[in-house]
Amino acid sequence: MSDLLGVSGIMSGIGGMNNWKRDSDVNGAAANEAADRVAQDIRRIARKLLSDGEVDVFIGYGQGTLPSRVTPVFITRPEDADALIWDARCENDLVVYLPGIEGKAGVVVKGCDGRALARLLAEKQVERDRLKIVAVECAGVIDRKSVKRDGGNRVHLHPSCQVCEERTAPVYDFLAGGATGPVVPGGPGDKSGSRDPFGEIREFEARASEERWNYFSQEFDRCILCYACRQACPLCYCPECFADRATPKWIGKDRALSDKMVFHLGRAIHLAGRCIDCGACVRACPMGIDLRKLTRKMEKDARELFGYEAGKAAAAGALPLFASFTREDPDDFIL
C-alpha cells in the first residue's frame, strides 16, 4: 500500500518532481499534468487576489534551497505569484501560520490542512471573513525519509496520507485545478471497504500492556524535548503551553523519562478530537519518534466512542470534543 510512488529524477530540475510517476492505474504523465494545472491555477488565483486587494498576503509553496524540498512562501506582490508551485513535495501544513497573520490572507490547503483550518475557525482562532481559502485535491505527499531509506530511487506516500479519507478541504473559496483525477488506491480519499484506516492502531492495541509501555518508553526516551512537534502542529496554539509554565511546573529541566511522558501524554489528550493526522509532528521530530501511535489512538476513540471526526464537514463548526456533551455519550468507564 505504501509503495505508491516511483520517482525517477526527483532530484532533477529546479521545478521539482518533473518526472515522477505512480505505480498504479494512474498514468504518470497525467499525474504530472494535473499537478501543473493546479500550480498554474494557484498562481492565477493568488495574482488576482493580490491585484484586487482582497488579500494582503498569500501563503503557498515555493521551491526550497534543495531540489527535493519546498518551502512556505509569503507572497505580497502580484508579480511574485510565479514563485508558487504545487507537487507531491508540498508537505507543510500552512495553516499553522494563520493565527499570527495580521490583515487578510490567502492560503493553499490540502485535505488535512483544510480540516485543521476548520477546527481553528470553530475555535475562533482565525476569522473566516479575513481568509481566502484555496483548496487542492491532494493525492498525497511523499515521505522524504523513504528517499533516504531506498537510496533515492523509490519513495512512498507519507503514512498519514495512506490512511487519509478526505483529499479536499471541507470549506474553501477556490478549488485550484478543479477535480484532478481518480483516487489512487491506498492514497488520500480511498474509502474502499478493504482498507481499515485504524488497522495499525488495532494491532498495537492488541499487544500486552507491558509491551505497549515498553514501546512508548523506548520511543520517548529518545525525545530531547525540543518541542518541534508542538511548534509544527496547527492546533497547538496556546499562548502559554503547559510545558512552559513555571507555576505549576509540569516539565523538569533534566529531561527525565517521566517528564517526557508528561509532555507527550498531556499533548495527546489536548489534541483528542482535534488532531487531523496531518503528520506535521512526525515530520518535524529530529529523533524520528512516531507520535501518530498516540494521536491516532485518540482519533480512533473519538470516532468510535463519540462519533466525532475532527474537521470533517459535519463537525467543521462543532465545538471541540471535550467542550461538548450529549446524553448519548458512553459512560461505561465511570465507576
Image (cartoon, rainbow, N blue to C red):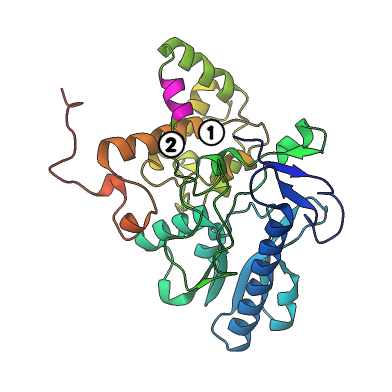
Q: Name the kind of residue labelled 2 in the image.
A: Ala
User: How many residues crowd mark 2 within 10 Å: few (<14), some (14–19), many (20+)?
Assistant: many
| Marks 2 & 1, CB-CB < 8 Å contact | yes
Q: Nearer the viewer, residue 278 or 253?
A: 278
User: How many residues crowd mark 1 within 10 Å: few (<14), some (14–19), many (20+)?
Assistant: many
Q: Which residues are magenta?
A: 199-205
Q: Is residue 52 left or right of residue 142?
A: left
* Farthest residue, direction bottom: 52
Label annotation for residue 268: 2
Label annotation for residue 76: none
Q: Nearer the viewer, residue 238 or 113?
A: 113
Which residue sits at x=41%, y=32%? 297
Q: Name the kind of residue labelled 1 in the image.
A: Leu
Q: How many marks?
A: 2
Which residue sits at x=64%, y=66%? 60
Horizontal and vertical percent for residue 16?
79, 57
* Farthest residue, direction left: 327
Q: Is residue 51 left or right of residue 335?
A: right
The residue under label 1 is 291
Q: CA distance from mark 2 to mark 1?
A: 9 Å
Residue 155's place in the image compared with 62, above or below, is: above
Q: Quadrant of residue 151?
A: top right
Residue 276's place in the image compared with 313, above or below, is: above
Q: Is residue 25 left or right of residue 173?
A: right
